[in-house]
Image (cartoon, rainbow, N blue to C red):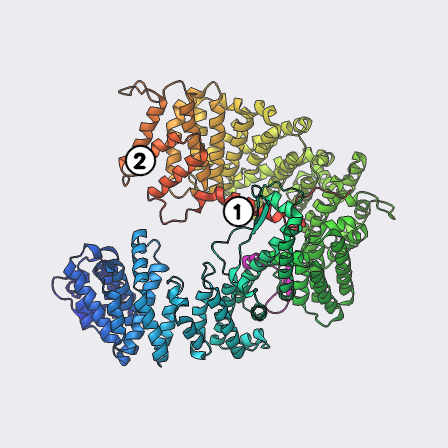
Amino acid sequence: MAAEKLRDLSQPIDVPLLDATVAAFYGTGSKEERNAADQILRDLQNNPDMWLQVMHILQKTQNLNTKFFALQVLEGVIKYRWNALPVEQRDGMKNFISDVIVQLSSNEASFRAERLYVNKLNIILVQILKHEWPARWRSFIPDLVSAAKTSETICENCMAILKLLSEEVFDFSRGEMTQQKIKELKQSLNSEFQLIHELCLYVLSASQRAELIRATLSTLHAFLSWIPLGYIFESPLLETLLKFFPVPAYRNLTLQCLTEVAALQFGNYYDVQYVKMYNIFMAQLQGILPPTTNIPEAYAQGSSEEQAFIQNLALFFTSFYKATDLAETGVFEIIVDYNSPSFSVTYHFGLLVHIRILESTQENIASLLIGLEYLINISYVDDTEVFKVCLDYWNSLVSELFEPHRSLDNPAAAATMMGLQVPAMLPGMVDGHGSQLLQRRQLYAGPMSKLRMLMICRMAKPEEVLIVEDENGNIVRETLKDNDVLVQYKIMRETLIYLSHLDHDDTEKQMLRKLSKQLSGEDWTWNNLNTLCWAIGSISGSMMEEQENRFLVMVIRDLLNLCEITKGKDNKAVIASNIMYVVGQYPRFLRAHWKFLKTVVNKLFEFMHETHPGVQDMACDTFLKIVQKCKRKFVITQVGENEPFVSELLTGLPITIADLEPHQIHSFYESVGHMIQAESDAQKRDEFLQRLMELPNQKWMEIIGQAHQNVDFLKDQDVIRTVLNILQTNTSVASSLGTYFLPQISLIFLDMLNVYRMYSELISKSITDGGPFASRTSYVKLLRSVKRETLKLIETFLDKAEDQPQIGKQFVPPMMDPVLGDYARNVPDARESEVLSLFATIVNKYKAAMIEDVPRIFEAVFQCTLEMITKNFEDYPEHRLKFFSLLRAIATHCFPALICLSSQQLKLVMDSIIWAFRHTERNIAETGLNLLLEMLKKFQGSEFCNQFYRSYFLTIEQEIFAVLTDTFHKPGFKLHVLVLQHLFCLLETGVLTEPLWDVATSPYSYSSNAVFVREFTIKLLSTSFPNMTASEVTQFVNGLFESTNDLSTFKNHIRDFLIQSKEFSAQDNKDLYAEEAAAQRERERQRMLSIPGLIAPSELQDEMVDS
């Protein structure tokens, strides 16, 4: 009954009853009561007449939650229906809200008591303003300012409204209002700002009331980023702000305002005012926070206000120093004017303008250096966010200091990068500029030296380091990668490389001094050693080779000594981790110094016996990394040695790997495979391989021997695990040896296929007897692991082996029945997806030679796999991807075999391709699209071109438009465009000589296929997008035909259509620009390659110059 009474809005709502309902919703009553109240409130909210009761409710209720409910109803109307309401209703509501705000804020007691309510009313008023002002409420700002002058509490609330208005228009307007409306509001705020400006200055000069001053400063902070500059620099505003800065109560708000001013970017018109502001600020700051203060300690012990002050200070300095002149920003470049009589050379930098002004006089330089000193001290504060702010600035400063020096040291190289031909006389012409740059380098030498120490002390952990200190102070193996730390490491590494280039000697000196303090024990802690070694590893490649060699000899010697003299397992683990990280970063040094390389590798072998968590893993990873870069060194007999190192290693191999886990042993075997692969003498290579595989082969022969006597021996779980381990070891060696693995795989191949067949039968029997759940038992999982590893081993070998037809002839025919036949015979749950990827690899490797085998492959896998994957989009995800990869390999290399398919089979293939690119799993959709493109191109050049396209042209076009416009398939945008372009090009080139329309059923004939497809496409899109006009659709389709031959225009045309169709508006559309983003990443990589060290030498795919 009560519910019905509330729902009847033909008379004023019963406010006490509404209060009770709201109380029931928020109360602690039963779940049923809350649900019933929720339903009533929802019904009221959805009633279009409910908003007419809002005034009545707000006047009668004392319950804050009821008031909020009423305002929520009103907010919905303002957002979506305001302009449709009659004028008198709009004006009535506008005046009512304004009156309530004035009434509540004119009285100190009610203003404080009803603060939450007033804040919500302010938000409602600003929502109304977005519709009414300026056109229908021209007097709003003058009214507000005059009201503010009547009482200090009203003034404080007016400041809050102004702040909200500024944020709505300048910060949150995107997607909420049209561009035209945003522009109109910004112009109105700008033109009426004088009144607001006068009010703010008046309050700051006349008021003694702390809350009002804080509200005014807070409002100014919101306005400063966009107001006309004259209001800041040609009025007493800056002086007033600087007057408030020393007062503790206003310090943080004032500093935020000054930071907004510091960050403004424009020309040099107000340089004098900037310098004056900076100098007064620095003088005041030294009184508040003396330069001798230990800022990290003060921060750690400070209150939240004091900590906020340090954070704001970091933002002020970085904003001030980073501000650039918009007219001068841009990548560093050299512009050579060949036409000028004097042949001039101009440098353009992304100028950090404010900092340049401070470099102009001695007095300003002193002030600048003090500021940089403060910022370096703040950078030591133990707070991630503060450090990120500082680091971001340091990175931009050092790159700005480095760029001109790089080009000065080698102007021709810099110019060549820009694609310029520079005459030989150019270097002499930059002498004047050169001396300026050298002076600037000297000016920053002091701060840069301190910055190097900061980077060394706070270096983030690189990805390769697996050993970390946990929260209890124990050294453990890292379990999860911290992406934030990796990003921070990348920026710090880049910063330190620039710093190293600016002064190699100082970098070396500081690192060695800090290392000697570790040795002497004066500065020894885990963290200090870690950050130092991470810093040493990060500058690899930035020094000249001779200096790097000298530096590293000392570093590695000191670290090895430290390892000898330090006691304690945890300490040794930390030192071991650091030695491994450093040596792994300097392959160039190791290649040039055999004795060091041998010492380092033997040290890694020692670490392989160290059972401390993470040490063995890191030793194996580092060993692999070093061997990949220095493999040739291990197979030649070095001076003073009796045999190559690999031979010595193979002799001691059982002892070296005695304490390693299976996955570590596999990594070790892969490393040794790389060494053997570098041996050019075939006889020695086979001998090394035979010695390497001695242990696993011995075990394999034992197992096969036992199986010949009693086949049940192979069913024992421990035996299955051993077989799996042996196969994994073989796969590891095959991955690094490639073709040279042939003698080893030939030895075990046929026995391996027999084991495969037997295990397959066991799996099928288990699943047939035990049902689908049997496939999840540990026994069946173990058997399947052996099958998968067998397939992986064969695939790895065939993939890595050089293209030798006799290898294919030796290995493919014996696999046809044990592998392919087995796949067809098995129940679906027992089929291994690796069979599909193995045959995809075989077809990709042996290409047309496989044409005769394709029908056999199709017969075995096609029908049965399709049945598995077309029931839904979820089951058998591995089979899906590998099936389409196999189809693509066949389409690419064995196309004649596809033409031989019956029309029913070809339809199945095409249906499966369409099904693939409809998939929301990105890699499956992409594989399907690539396969489709391959098929389209192959059929275009075949004799069945007309027949194929008559059957599938319209279907493909329709399906591609469906995925192109549905927002779930955005990552496939580039390939969708290529397919459409291919189809439209076909129409233009006249390759299709037969009509695409059905001549028998079509009422009239078209003059060409292009005319028919144009009409078909217009109909298709008009039906799909009823929100678009016929002329918009026609214009789009015509545009497609006009831009067919220009991929870039064609693509942009489709992008515009997607946005225009409203399907893609207000969404993240970065996938539509993925190609451009990839091109930008490639340009960035080329830039990094041009600066020695920016890409770590261990990451470069360098040619092995280590003979």
Q: Position of residue 719 (x, y in %)?
A: 67, 45
Q: Mark 1: give few (<14), some (14-19) or many (20+) Cα within 10 Å.
A: few
Residues at marks 1 and 2, CA–CA distance in whole angstroms: 54 Å
Q: Mark 2: give few (<14), some (14-19) or many (20+) Cα within 10 Å.
A: many
Q: Position of residue 1002 (x, y in %)?
A: 29, 21
Q: Residue at x 34, y 67 (%)?
A: 163
Q: Residue at x 36, y 20 (%)?
A: 995
Q: Depth check: give the residue in front, 399 or 48.
A: 399
Q: Depth check: give the residue in front, 793 or 303.
A: 303
Q: Position of residue 507 (x, y in %)?
A: 69, 61
Can you name the residue that lies furthest to the front here?
A: 341
Q: Amino acid at mark 2?
A: Val
Relative to 941, does residue 198 appear above or below in the rendering? below
Say if the magenta span includes residue 481. Answer: yes
Answer with left or right where residue 14 lies relative to residue 930.
left
Q: Amino acid at mark 1?
A: Arg
Frontmost of labels 1 and 2 is 2
Say if the magenta span includes residue 589. Answer: no
- Dividing the picture into quarters, in which one does residue 269 lie? bottom left
Q: Depth check: give the residue in front, 344 or 371.
A: 344
Q: Depth check: give the residue in front, 612 or 724.
A: 612
> What is the quadrant of the C terminus in the image?
top right
- Dividing the picture into quarters, in which one does residue 377 lie? bottom right
Relative to 1053, does residue 38 appear above or below in the rendering? below
Q: Position of residue 933 (x, y in %)?
A: 48, 31
- Dividing the picture into quarters, in which one does residue 1101 lie? top right
Q: Residue at x 55, y 53 (%)?
A: 349
Of mark 1 and mark 2, the one earlier in the sequence is: 1
Answer with left or right where residue 166 lies relative to residue 615.
left
Residue under numbered circle 2: 1033
Residue under numbered circle 1: 776
Task: State the extent of the magenta-drawn residues as a range.
Answer: 465-490
